[in-house]
Every structure is written in C-alpha cells, then in structure tokens.
Image (spheres, rainbow, N blue to C red):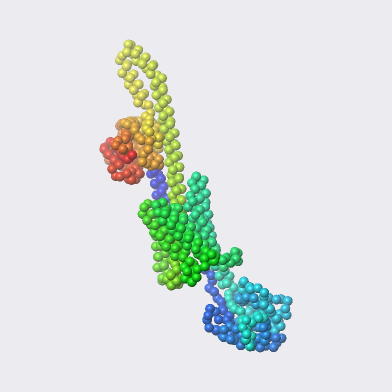
Amino acid sequence: MRKEIRKEMRKETKKLPITIFAVVLSILLGIPSALAVFYYTRPMEDASYDLSLAPQDGQEWEGNKGWTVYTNEAGNVTELTPDGAGGYLGADHLGQTFYYSRTLTEELDSPTLQIGSVNQTFSVFLGDTLIYTDDPQQDNRIGYVALSNLEWDRLETITISLPPDYLGQTLTIAQSSSAFSEVESDEITVWPCNVRLYCGYAYESGLIASASGIMLPVALLFALELLLLAALIRNATAGNISLQLPVFALAILMQICNLLAKADFTARYIGVTSFDLVWTSFHLSVGILLLFLALQAKHLRPLYLSCTAIQCCATLLFLLTQLGKLNPSGDQYMFFINLPQYTGFVTLLAALTCAFLLWKKGDRFFSYLSKTALLLTGGYALFLLSCIPLYPEYISTVLRRLQGDTITHVPNATLKLLWNLVLISGLAAVVMELFDRESERRTELAVLTARNELAMESYENLRRQSQEVMMIRHDTMKHYSLLRQMAKDAPERIENYLDELIGQVEDVRPVISTENQTLNILLNGKLHAIAEKGSFKGISKDISKDISIEIVRAEAPAQLPLSDPELCCLVANILDNAISAASAPGISEPFIRLDLHCKDQYFVFTCENSRAASDNKTKKIPTQKHGYGVKIIRQIMSRFGEHTLSIEESETTYQVTVILPL
C-alpha cells in the first residue's frame, strides 16, 4: 500500500501542471463565450427622435417641432391653433378628422415610425402616397379621409417602417378625434397622438436585449434547479432522501418567477394579477431560502426556523393587503406593503451572521457558505474599486440605488444584494458538499474493495493453516510410533527427527483471532501476503530468507475509536512499512513482531521489524521505506494527541506503537 500511495502522490504531482493548464484554458475559452452569450443583453445605442406635440412627464410645451396641424375638407384647409398643453383649437365639429404634417429631415438607418394610440384611428401618408390606414375601405386621399374612433383601446402602439427614400419627404398623419366632449367650450380641442421616429435596428436590439436579459438568468437558474433535482434523485438511489435539495430548488423556482414577472411580455401571457407578482415571488423566495438554511443547520435550527416564520408571516400580510382582505389606510397600508422587505433584510442578515458562527463550530456546509460569502464580498468590493476609474457610470448607478434606500427607508437594493449573496453562497456550499459526499462514497467503496481482498487473503491463510494442522494431526500417531521404535533401535536419530518435526510446526501460517473482525481481516491478510512473498507488491523478489513472524499477544476489543477506512489505512501502512523494511537486502534474520493488547482502557498495538544496518550504502533505505507511511500514520493519530504514537529506532530494528483510547 505504501508503494501505491507513493505512486498516487507522484500521479497527483504530475496532475498539478495539467490541472493548471486546464484551468487557464477554461478561463481563456470561458470568458469569450460568456461575452458572446451576454453580448445581446446590451442594446444598441438608441438613435431616436421624439416628435410628439404633447409635453412629456410634466415638461413644458416645446412648440410645434416642425409640425403643421390643420383640418382639410376636400381641399379647404384650416390651420389649428395650439393651446400650449399639446392640444389644438379650431376644429369645425366633434369627431372631425384632422391632419398634422412635417418634412422628415432626421437621417436614420431602418427608419421606423411609432404612433401611440388609444382608441383613435389613423391614415398615414408619405408625400401623397398612403403607407398605412386603419380603414382601407375609405377614400384614402388627403382631404377626403373620414375616420372614426375605435370601440376599444389599443394595447400596442402602431409601428410603421418607412421606405429608404423617406428623407426630405412630407409625413402626413390623418387622425380621428372624439365625437364627445367632457368640457363645455366654445372651441373644439383635438389632441395629436405621440409620435416617435427611431432606428428599427436599435428598437429590435432593445427587444432582444430585454428578452435576453431576462431569459439568460432564467435559463441559468433552471439549469441549477435541474442539477439539484438530479442530486436529489442520485441520493434517493443510494437510499438517502434529503429534503434540503427540493426546498432549495423551490427557492430557485421562486426567483425564476420573479425574473419572468419583470418581463414586459408577462402580462400578455397570464394577464393582470390582483397582487404584485414580482415582489410576492421575491418575498416567497426569501422565506424558502431561510427554510433551506434551517434544514441545513443543526445547532441553531430554532433561530433559523424563527426567521423563516417571521418572513412567511410578513409575506402573508403583504398578500392579504394587496388582495383587499386587509384594509389598512395611510401609513398602515405602506407599513404592510413594505414589511416583507424589512423582515427579509433583517432575517437574511441574521442567517448570514449565524452561518459564520456555525463555521466556527466546524459545520462543513456553513463553512463553505461563509467562505464563499467572504470571497464574493471581497470580489465585489474589488470590482467596485476597479469601476471607479474604468466605469464610473456603474458606480453612479449603485450610489443612486443605495441613496434611494436611504431616502425611502425601505431596503430594496441592499436587500437584493444580500439575497443574491446568500443564494449564490448557499448554492456553492450545496455543490461542494455534494462533491465531498461523492468523494467520501468513492473512498468508502475503495476501502470496502480493499477490505474484501484482504478478507479473501485472511480466509486463504486460515484455510491453509487449518489444512497444515490437520496434516500434522493426521501424522502425529505415526510420528509417535516411529519415535518409539527409534528409541529402541536408533536413539541417535531422535534428535534430528525432532528438529525436523519442530520445523514443520514453525512453518504453519500464523493466524490472529481477536474480537475485532476488521482488525482480523487486515492482519491475517497481510500475514498471508508475507507468506506468499511475491504476491505483496512492496516485497523484493530477491529475498534469500523468509520473514519470521512472531505474535506476542493478540487481544483487541470489538470496537475501536476509528472508522473502518481509518483503521484500514493505519494498520495497512504500519504493516506495509514493516514488510518493506524487513524485506530489504542485507538482513541476516528478517522478522516482524506484533503485540496487540488492552491496558487501562487503552488499546496498544506494537509492530517491531528488522531493517538493514544504517551504513553508508543503506543509510537512506529506512527513511525512504517509512517516509510516506509515517506521515499518514501521524495524520490519523494526531487527533488522539502526540503521546499516542511512539516510534523507536535502532541500528537493526524499527518499532511503531500506537495507543488508542477505548
């Protein structure tokens, strides 16, 4: 085993440059791939012109912007007068079709006209050519159009692609006006709709960027959810059901719903809901994430469950308020609406703080979570520092969001940052823990395989010893009869004959039988390897003498404070080192002496072996033979204290003693 360990360590050493090369290559290929995937999440520069006559967002009226607004009845043109608020006075009657025209001087690629309509109808002309109409059955000529309003409101704007030779031509829009007036006035007011001229490529790029910005994170989260569900199925096949995995997958599902609810197209698919789907899914994801951490925690589980209950109750009050089941007014209404954001921030911060406490207590999962959280926080801080000279716009955006939290006293941006930190850290901890468990499973499988091999060797040793004892027993009467006859006829031959019989008894294979079955398998398997010589990989094939085995005592309790893999590794390394050292050339009488006994609530295992004399030629042999094995033995015994392992050396012997508390 020692030789195999050395071989594995050499393999690991060789793997290091290969691993570094693979990591560097992955980064070099991954960064361009990520840039290519996320390239379309950033829209093209928006080249557009707002040609609307009505002022936007409370701004002052900016004039006619080159438009002429008029009525035209069979060539009888009447120019309308602006009222300074986006409306025009002077129509002859209610419901009259009016026109607004201007010369197009704005140069754009893929020119596209967008008209924001509600229930009005339109006919659009470029020069004298009709390029769009809501009513093709009419006499669609300028001055002869008679448009009426729709009986419903449009949900989308009207989008018209202009021909490439649009530049310098006159754009004329015929629009219907209302047949009813809510305000009594001597003059009739008409209201031109909003008009925007933009580059079609930029508009399409904006749509692609908006969809990509939503769907790429959704696809990534969906892949992670599938990974968790696959791990759930994998654990189930091994007979282990872990509720943490489906709960964490549900938290990711809520975040997927949160992202999809932000998309512009969500209302088209599911309609308008009576509650805020974006914040509801987010608050639920926070509560479910806290429940996942509560299931993972062992020492502070009541605290995590309390945080989960607080967040779920706050989310329930939020939903009841929006659904009208609770009817608070004024400040109470805003309190219930913002309550899950307050509780989410506080509970997530408390959960992250508790994670650091559990890390100090040695919890593996929360150790991974805390380390990842620290790494992400440090990385984000460095990113912000690098953005100060390189990308100051991002810093301004972050400061505006944090300032918004300060002004409104509602944690919005900080809550989302904290949620992302806990989610990503938790996901990294889950993945690393899954890898650890898979590694442990493979290790246990390898140890079990090795134990089975040693068990077969132990069985073979027992079988051969039993066979040899039966053969000696079968011949005992014959030997006694022959000795009796020799005493009469040739007494001088008795001594040689007895020496021969003693040699046969000494050749019987030694067998160790203690109360600990694992230890029996390990020791008898190794003794079988010594008896077979060449079958043990660490033994030289040029041995001139057999190794003498002496068992001083063979006492061991059924239970030892080591797991089977640890016991196997400890005993195998001790015996492998002893066999390898005793097999070195130049040893006149190679031996291995084993002593197993219990004393004062301790199990003592001593292995003494011969070794080559430490002259100039063989000086390095013992060190080389015991190097890696001793390191492994020290590592296993380190948790029991420094006085539980003793190594004694002389010129021709080497002795290892381990003391295990019972």
- From this view, report whether residue 631 is shown above or below residue 131: above
Can residue 597 be seen?
yes
* Residue at (62% x, 75% y) in the render: 118
| 502 sits to left or right of 100 | left
* Residue 636 x %, y %: 35, 44
Query: Along the horizontal axis of the image, is 597 left or right of 212?
Result: left
Kindly give the residue lying farthest to the top in the view shown: 488
Q: Residue at x 57, y 86 (%)?
A: 84
Q: Which residue appears at 33% of the width and 11% of the height? A: 489
* Residue at 65 percent of width and 81 percent of height: 180
Q: Residue 625: name its quadrant.
A: top left
**Image side of residue 460 versus residue 552, left or right:** right
Q: Is residue 628 visible?
A: no
Image x and y of residue 42, in percent: 52, 68
Position above or below: 231 against 94:
above
**Residue 557, x across and y down, in percent:** 36, 35
Question: Between residues 219 and 106, which one lies in front from this camera angle?
Answer: 219
